[in-house]
Amino acid sequence: MSSVAVPFYQRRHKHFDQSYRNIQTRYVLEEYAARKAASRQAAYYESTGLGKTTCRLCARRARTLAHEAIQESRKRTHEQKSHASEEKRIRFASELSALEKEIHTARHRAREHLDRLTIQRMVEENMALERHAVEESISRAPEILVRLRSHTVWEKMSVSLCFTVQGYPTPVVQWYKNEELITPASDPAKYRIESKYGVHVLHINRADFDDSATYSAVATNIHGQTSTNCAVMVRRFREDEEPHPAGIMPFHLPLSYDVCFTHIDVQFLEKFGVTFGTEGETLTLKCSMLITPDLKRLRPRAEWYRDDVLIKDSKWTKLYFGEGQAALSFTHLNKDDEGLYTLRMVTKGGVSEYSAYLFVRDADALIAGAPGAPMDVKCHDANRDYVIVTWKPPNTTSESPVIGYFVDKCEVGLENWVQCNDAPVKICKYPVTGLYEGRSYIFRVRAVNSAGISRPSRVSEPVAALDPVDLERTQTIHVDEGRKIVISKDDLEGDIQIPHPPTNVHASEISKTYVVISWDPPVPRGREPVTYFIEKSMVGSGSWQRVNAQVAVKSPRYAVFDLAEGKSYVFRVLSANKHGISDPSEITEPIQPQDTIVVPSAPGRVVATRNTKTSVVVQWDKPKHEEDLYGYYIDYSVVGSNHWEPGNHKPIKYNRFVVHGLETGEQYVFRVKAVNAVGFSENSQESEAITVQAALTCPSYPHGITLLNCDGHSMTLGWKAPRYSGGSPILGYYMDKREANHHNWHEVNSSLITRTIYTVEDLVEDAFYEFKVAAANLVGIGQPSDPSEHFKCKAWTMPEPGPAYDLNICEVRNTSLVLLWKAPVYEGKSPITGYFVDYKEVDTEDWITANEKPTSKRYFKVTDLHEGHTYVFKVRAVNDAGVGKSSEISEPVLVEARPGTKEIFSGVDDEGNIYLAFECKEATDASHFAWGKSYEEIEDSDKFRIETDGTQSKLYFKNPDKSDLGTYSISVSDTDGISSSFVMDEEEFERLMALSHEIRNPTIPLKSELAYEVLEKGEVRFWIQAESLSPNSTSRFVINDKEVENDDRHKINCDRSNGIIEMVMDRFTIDNEGTYTVQIQDGKAKNQSSLVLIGDAFKAVLAESELQRKEFLRKQGPHFSEFLYWKVTEECEVLLACKVANTKKETVFKWYRDGSGIDIDEVPDLQKGECQLSIPKLSRKDEGVYKATLSDDRGHDVSTLELSGKVYNDIILALSGVSGKSASPLKILCTEEGIRLQCFLKYYNEEMKVNWSHR
């Protein structure tokens, strides 16, 4: 069911029945109902009484009671009804009053609405009347102001028909060709219609004969129409059919592409820059472009130029154009390819072009120190057996000068290169003779210096050994049916036996090494082939010498070599054929071999000026003598290095050149030399040193204009500074404004705005405005920014904060970056509590919030980004009311670390000062290193000191403490966003503080602390070893707080080369107990080490010293090198042995047992160094103290061994082992006592323990 819309004033109505209209009727009905109920009750009582017998008095009483009950009931009923009626009446009255009030309000609102509609209708009617009146006043039928003009054009040219019309409403124009309607859709390649400001144009592209017609234009509006027409005649040029009038030569029309027709816009997207290559490499220059409109029939033509010379497809270069890309490929780079390359896109509406320089370095020389290859080899004046080859010399900087050149030739189709000259030719020109007529040749050149021969140059274009005059001596006559008759002048000259002599003999080339003689062939010369002989004569000699006696010359020129320097010669030429030789020609003027051109003089003053961050513009004065210059070579060198590098590798003809490939921030000097065929000039004077920086220009345009606050009468705007300051600090900004839909801009400020935020006053409330900003520096005012959006001047009253502004992106790395911003100017109704950072990829729609909780800082590091992707960012401020407006979206940024990205590093200088340092090679003179802590610029001069030197800046900590912990950042202005940060955590801070303390209080590092050792004589040596000691180091020994000097008792020595300091005490006694200390000082560095010898430690050293002293004294005479020891032989004998040393013949050796001497049968040989005493059958009776003595006049020595107790038991155990091994197998012996098991041993003693076992 469909619902019916109820008016708002009826939605709250309460509906009632008709009873409230007659209250009295309702009361009558209620009274009637009560009486009927009372009568029914009385009837009931009466019926019940009929069944009984009562008296009349009782019956009356009963009736009386019943009547009273009825009356009472009626009275209660009446009171209840009255009370209920009163409540209903009151409720009804209140509801009726509310209803009347709602109806009154609804009527008032309806009246206001009707009044507003009435007023609006009246205004619209008045405006319509006024508009109609204005339109009536300006309305008129179309009127043609400038009519069409007839044209006569050549075929394949374009024609534009135009006229001007006015009228209101704007007339609609239609074009007709011979009464047929023309539309752009009918033939978009042929017709293009334009209409602008009342001027209407019909473009006809590449008109042909069929386009000859009458063209009409009809302009129509509601008031009428008008028309204009013209005739177009297209003429066809028929050069082959139309004869030329006498005396008028045929002329050529310009090619079609030289005339601009349809406008096709070509916008270069990706362009090749300044390119560096090396000889032998392959290389491609590319340009991608956007062509609008991209029509197949109107494709532009790509033309490549090198130094304004058109490049065509060849063996060395390949051209490509298609799919929005033009490319030029080099199959094998040579220095011939160096130059300024220009890509010109030729359309039928104009030419778009782009240029950049290609540098080609020399390939590595085959021989170290050999020169680079020559270049630009060309052939001139080719004839039957002769050609002149020219080339350009290579530049030499560090190599030795070129002393000459070798020219090689090769017949086309072969690979057999033949050297043409035996000795190097010193000039860049050489006449090659001995060619075979009719064959084609290519040539190459190699340079020679003292180190060796260079690589060969690129080969020349092929040249044919033919006489060009032969082509002129033939004439072709066309006859019927396409037949041709070729006639030679030789056939017309008749029979000539001996030819006439040549004429016009002269020297066409003169140099020190050769002279080229040229002449004109004899006329007539006859039908037979003519050859020539050349004769020379030294002036004054009177004799003639034939130069080419063996082989006749076929060409009318010849190069004569081997002429004496300083002598003059005359020449004559003779013609010859098979019939004989002509008379000699006239003699030439005396000719002296000499260079007709000289080495050019050095170029003049060289001036270098800044250009870009990697290039410098070099200009120079031309030399005074610049005859036949090939061009100039420019060299450059880093200041102080004296190492020169070539700035170009092919001579340039201009006296201005841009040297590329320099390092930003380095200082360079430049020099120039001129070159011609003879050689190089002297080097020019060096230019003034120049630092490679970008040239000073006006700043680029600001961007990102944002509305930050508005109070209804003023607007606060913010913007971003220009990306480049132009090489000079930005002084301020100028702002212009205009209302929306207004044409003229108005200046906002007359004085410079020094900040990137400004409040514009005196604005009209609710009006829309747009703004633009321009930056200014010392050079001037830069380009203004693009106009901002239309901002409405309406007061901001929202409780949320306004937008953050000035979003900057820094520290771009492979997967992260840092985003900075400034707090909103408009905070809303409560303070800002944090910020949300959002980002997304450029090609996506969904935004990602980088932080889950608002950050209170005005910077944020965004991580986990994808390398190589492009992102944009925005920031939203938050307060208690909620999230505010988003900031302007940042510029797209490619997440990728720049090549050669450097970071902030920490360090401590020589004075112990802690610093952070950053180096930026791209910094310019206008760059500013901005240090910050927590990304807020540091301005506290009490805690920090900033020093900037060229491309490096350092931040010094004056009084470092724990408050210096945090994140430090730096950004370099006027660069491509170079920035970095450094986290100073507690661990790094402690490391730097320790290093600073060590530098300010340096210590000498020790390899070993103070130690002692006891020498063999009982001397005690105290020593210490440092890592290193300088020759100026000092040391001292202190014993018990008393310095000791170097004397006989304390021998002190310092080996500084090994860092060892020692003190030797000859006699160590009980008085030497105490503390020993060594103190070392080396410049500012100090160190000391102590050794405590007290108590047991001292006693141990003293005992060891005494022992070593006694041992030393003992060993001065005969002594035991090994004291008495025992051993057991295989025969179960016990030997007491000792070893002696330092004995002589007079030395006496004796054995003793328990103080009594032992007689031995054989006196030991002391020279063998060993003495032995044999005990055959050891038993308890052999126990005792055995002693051996040595004595002579030098002293004596004693060694004792107590053979008892444990020693005796050990000997018995050893004997048991030896004896047990000698045991015989068990034997069974039957005796009276029983069976006996027995075996035999080499030795048995009762001390030996015997164990029997049974299995």
Image (cartoon, helix red, strand yellow):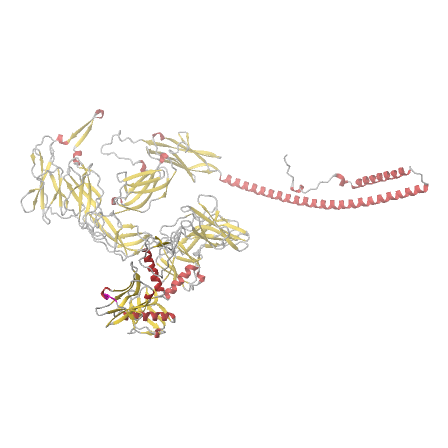
In the rendered image, residue 750, in percent from the top left (x then y), is placed at 44, 55
Q: Tell me which corner region of the image, top left, top right, bottom left or bottom right, holds residue 1051.
A: bottom left
Is residue 481 placed above or below 223 in the rendered structure? above
Residue 38 point in image, percent of width and height: 85, 40
Magenta stretch, residue numbers: 1160-1165
Q: Is residue 1162 magenta?
A: yes
* Occupied quadrant, residue 149: top left
On whether residue 382 falls in the magenta region, the answer is no
Residue 32 shown left or right of residue 569 in the figure: right
Q: Looking at the rendering, which quadrant does residue 308 occupy?
A: top left
Viewer can see residue 236: yes
Q: Image check: 666 left or right of 812?
A: left
Q: Position of residue 191 (x, y in %)?
A: 39, 34
Q: Main secondary structure of the magenta part?
A: loop
Total numbered badges shown on the rendered structure: 0
Residue occupying the far left of the picture: 542
